[in-house]
Image (cartoon, coloured by chain):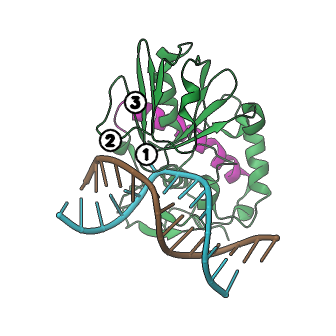
Chain colours: A green, B cyan, C brown
Amino acid sequence: MPEGPSIVILKEAVQQFKGKKIIAASGNSKKLNIDILTGQVITDFKSWGKHFLICLPNFAIRVHFMLFGSYRINEYSDKPARLHLQFDNGELNFYACSVMLIEQPLNEVYDWSADIMNPEFDHKKAVAKLKSNPDMLACDAILDQHIFSGAGNIFKNEVLFRIRIHPESLVGKLPDQKLHELVTETVNYAFDFLKWKKEFTLKKHWLAHTKTICPRDEVRFHKAILGKTRRRTFFCDRCQELYK
DNA sequence: AGTAGTGTTCGGCC
DNA sequence: TGGCCGAACACTAC
C-alpha cells in the first residue's frame, strides 16, 4: 500500500465520496476524536506523497498507511477499523494506519512541489536540495520525503539500477547530469509504478528489487542493509558506478 | 508455519 | 544538543 502511486490510486477510487456528507463515523483511532466527523461534508481528497488527505470544511484528516495499513471501499475487513466513514452511497474503511487531524491550512503544512506525483513537482528544487546534502548517500536521498515525497524502497532500488548509480555513492560526488537523471527517473518510475500497479504487473517489472541476478550483465546482485535509512538494497557493483 | 518487509515515530543511549 | 539505533506498530505474501 504505502508508496505514492498507491495513494494516487486510492484517491481516484474514492471520488464517489467527494461532496458527500459523513452520516456516521467510528473507529479505534486514538489521535482523532471521531465524533466530530459526523455530519461533515467531504470537500476534497488530496495526497502528498504517501499521505492521503481527507479534506473537510475546517480541517483535514491525514491517513498514513505505514508498512501494514490497508483500506476497503464499500466493503469491510474482519479487523477493527481504525477509521470507518459511512455515506449514503457507500463506505470507506481504513485499517492499521496512522490517522491524524490537521487543523492548519494544508498549503502551510505541505510543499506540493516536493511530491513526485504532483503536477507542481519542481525538478530544479529537487536538484538544489540534493546539492545542499553533499554527504548524503544516494540510497538515502531517494527515500528522503522532503526531496522525493512519495518514493519508497522499491523506488530506491529500481531508480538507482536504471541510472546505474551505486547506492553508496555520495550525492555531492554525482556529476550534474547524474543528479538530473536521478530526479527525472524517480518521477518517471512513479508513473511507471502507477501504470503497472493498476495492471497488477508491478512485481513483474522489477529489474533490481528482490532480484538475485543483474539483468544487464548477469552477475549476482548484492543484497545489503544500507544507509542511514537501513533498508534492503539490491544492486550490481559491475554496472552501477560508485561516485565517492 | 515462520519470516521479513512498499514506513515512520519515538525514546533511550552515548 | 544531537545523531544513531532499536523497538513498536500490526498485517500478509511468500
User: Which of the labelled discs sits on residue A96, or is there none?
Assistant: 1
Residue A157 lies left or right of residue A137; in this view the side is left
Distance from the alpha carbon under mark 3 to that under mark 2? 25 Å
Judge whether residue A183 is colored magenta: yes
Tag 1 and tag 2, C-beta contact below 8 Å: yes
Host chain of mark 3: A
Host chain of mark 1: A
Mark 2 Cα-neighbour bin, 10 Å: few <14, some 14–19, many ≥20 = few
Please tell me whether the stretch drawn in magenta is mainly helix, strand or loop.
helix
Q: Dot 3 corresponds to which residue?
A: A198
Magenta extent: A176-201
Residue A177 lies left or right of residue A219; in this view the side is right
Q: Residue at x 34, y 34 (%)?
A: A200
The answer to whether residue A235 of the structure is visible from this angle is: no
A91 w.r.t. A128: above or below: above
Residue A32 on image: x %, y %: 58, 39
Badge 2 amino acid: Lys
Do discs 3 and 2 share a chain? yes
Name the secondary structure under disc 3: helix
Distance from the alpha carbon under mark 3 to that under mark 1? 23 Å
Name the secondary structure under disc 1: loop
Badge 3 amino acid: Lys
Residue B11 on image: x %, y %: 61, 69
Name the secondary structure under disc 2: loop
